[in-house]
Amino acid sequence: MPDEAYYASLGLSSILDKVLSGERLTFEDGLALFACPDLTAVGALAAHARFRRHGDAAFYVVNRQINYTNVCVNGCLFCAFRRDHEEEEGAFVLSREDILARLEAAQSGTLRLDEMHMVGGCHPRLGLAWFEDLLRTVSDRWPGLPLKAFTPVEIAHFAALEGISTLEVLRRLKACGLRMMPGGGAEIFDEGLRSRLCPHKADAAAWLRISGEAHSLGIVTNCTMLFGHLESHAMRVDHLLRLRAQQDASGGFTCFIPLPFLTANNRLELPEDRTGPVRGLDQLRTVAVSRLLLDNIPHIKAYWVMLGPKLAQTALWYGADDLDGTIVEERIGHMAGAESAQGLTIPELETMIRASGFRPVRRNAVFEPMPVSGPETTACGAAELRKETC
Ligand code: V47
């Protein structure tokens, strides 16, 4: 890490002191970190915080993503995945059998999934009973498989469809085996910008409230921020601090995932200075500032699908401690222009981690470390999981 005099020259003396002593950073500190000209100095602070929590461990998960539909009533401007109705080109709705076949293919090889990650659009007619039946069937067939599904936005949608409270929706899904929720749909909390980008989606207060309700039932959740579109640094800091405040109140966020906006195939037009090669540096900085501000959220994910594997590896030195996982089939990022692979193998993930100077730790959905033994660690991984399913 650069020395005290250097941080003083950057005007970051008090932030350096706070990071070294573990003291909480303020809104102004967040802005100062975004304004600092030397990205590596910010990264070194985040790396310090990351090593203090996780040492040289870098986590990954053997998982399978499933998107049950892309038909969605919300019509968010930034989304390339969504279709307004089933007849539109590219629209899909998976059947229960389609979903079970994807899991069956994954579970019947030499691999064992440690996470099913399932999300979808807010379909106007798929009711809660359909999802209850699906979760119950999956839990009965694969009792040890942690089910991570539905963002707070989907929970709000199910509640509206059924005319019941979001807490009741969560109770019913938990009773069917829901263990964890992914962090999507948070987008950017700033009310003014959110109402331009996604006016029909659950608002910031609802997203945070539903996360808190899940936590109160013992369902842990992740959280995200979509950045690199029209938001300001102040909006990013505000978003991170609202997550931190929610975590102080309800304590169930496990991992934060900063999601860089991917620009293809959507209706959001960006000014020129928001596109191009500077974006990689901004993405590393956002990972670092997230690690520094979110002192109460254990994990920061460098999501390789959207950052790309090279930047995700670099991000491990900028505060991130997790890469996500094998994934197998990904649609939201790829429909928006992600150039990364559909899935990675276990050896590929472990090599990425080792080559970056870290120690790979296989985990499950809720970040419990998983034993690594036998042929699974050398099996072809995602390639094998992908058989017959895509
Ligand atoms: O909710 C939509 C975002 C999210 C774009 O919890 C876009 O472990 C970039 O939340 N460019 C879905 N992002 C992905 C997500 C996620 C992914 C991996 C792991 C976890 C986890 C969560 O993707 C959406 C939205 O915020 N998104 N469009 C786009 N054009």
Image: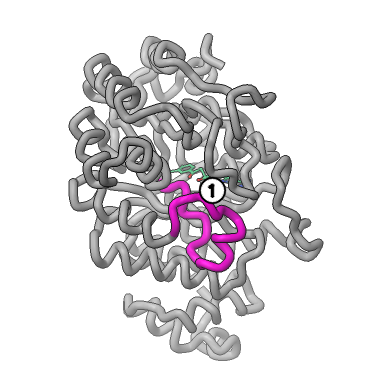
In percent of width and height, residue 367 lies at: 31, 43
Q: Report whether 116 appears left or right of 259.
A: left
Q: Report whether 136 appears left or right of 110.
A: left
Q: Residue at x 59, y 90 (%)?
A: 9
Q: Residues within 10 Å of mark 1 (few under 14, many from 20)?
A: some
Q: Magenta stretch mostly in which secondary structure? A: loop
The kind of residue tagged 1 is: Ser
Secondary element at image label 1: loop
Residue 202 is covered by the magenta coloring:
yes
Q: Residue at x 42, y 31 (%)?
A: 118
Q: Is residue 168 above or below residue 288?
A: above
Q: Residue at x 71, y 47 (%)?
A: 267
In percent of width and height, residue 202 lies at: 44, 52
Outermost residue to the front: 163
Outermost residue to the right: 272
In percent of width and height, residue 73 lies at: 53, 39
Stretch in magenta: 183-203
Q: Quadrant of the C terminus?
A: top right
**In this figure, which colouring scheme has been used for the structure?**
one colour
Residue 18 visible somewhere in the drawing: yes
**Which residue does the numbered mark 1 point to in the structure image?**
356
Q: Residue at x 33, y 26 (%)?
A: 131
